Image (tube, rainbow, N blue to C red):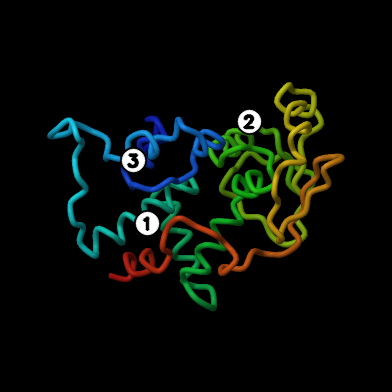
Amino acid sequence: MARYTEAYCRLCRRTGTKLMLKGQRCFGEKCAIERRNTPPGPHASSKGRRRSKVSDHGIQLMEKQKAKYTYGSYERQFRRFFDEASRLPGIKGANLLVLLERRLDNVVFRLGFADSRSQARQIVRHGHIKLNGRKTDVPSCLVKADDVIEWRKESTKSEYYKILIEKIEDKDIPAWLSLEKENMVGKVLALPAGQEIRTNFDEKAIVEFYSR
């Protein structure tokens, strides 16, 4: 799968669901779903193209796509996550959710260091984040319990960081993470539990898709 370069709002319109890919924009009047909840592309009428009835396989595929779009994962990478989730004890769908939540870019987002996962991926790729004291620029690497996530000293001088520390107090941090807001150091207290993770897709349908 090639890198996605189109507008993220098209992905929300394609799935008919708010995927929360644009941070605060998704909560405002500019949200694509609020303004025009129709699939992207040419429309047969001025009222927009209606969403046709979808088969069970189509529903399963769409749920998989929602998960991929939400976490910014490519197809081959997403399949590796699913295969790993299948090898772990327990429920496959819950295991998959936990693996996706453990991605470094998602943890950076959950800690409030970014307004969206796409912004978090950019922050990680540009080398602004340290994992256990070492610079890490791989957004898909998985964190584990007791890992420490912090900003590189050089990055704390950026204008973005200065703005971030002023609004970090308003961020809600999941229970499986902690954040020392004074020095902007996050820690993984424990691995997230599958039932505690809120998603906008059905992980059971994803399991059914790959189990065909």
In the image, farthest residue toward the top: 159
Which comes sooner in the sequence, label 1 or label 3? Answer: 3
User: Measured from the top left, where is residue 90 in percent x and y?
Assistant: 53, 78
SS at badge 2: loop
Label 2 to label 3: alpha-carbon separation: 29 Å
Amino acid at the residue labelled 3? Arg
Q: Is residue 172 above or below residue 95?
A: above
Label 1 to label 3: alpha-carbon separation: 16 Å
Around disc 3, counting alpha carbons within 10 Å, would you say few (fewer than 14), some (14 to 19), or many (20 or more)? many
Label 2 sits on residue: 126
Q: Is residue 12 above or below residue 162?
A: below
- Please state which of the two labelled residues, at mark 2 or mark 3, is closer to the viewer: 3
Residue drawn 18% across the image and 51% down it? 52
User: Measured from the top left, where is residue 94 in percent x and y?
Assistant: 51, 69
SS at badge 3: helix
- Please state which of the two labelled residues, at mark 2 or mark 1, is closer to the viewer: 1
Which comes sooner in the sequence, label 2 or label 3? Answer: 3
Around disc 2, counting alpha carbons within 10 Å, would you say few (fewer than 14), some (14 to 19), or many (20 or more)? few
Amino acid at the residue labelled 1? Lys
In the rendered structure, the answer to whether residue 113 lies left or right of residue 76 reads: right
Amino acid at the residue labelled 2? His
* Quarter in which the N terminus is drawn: top left
Label 1 sits on residue: 64
SS at badge 1: helix
- Please state which of the two labelled residues, at mark 1 or mark 3, is closer to the viewer: 3
Numbered circle sitting on residue 13: 3
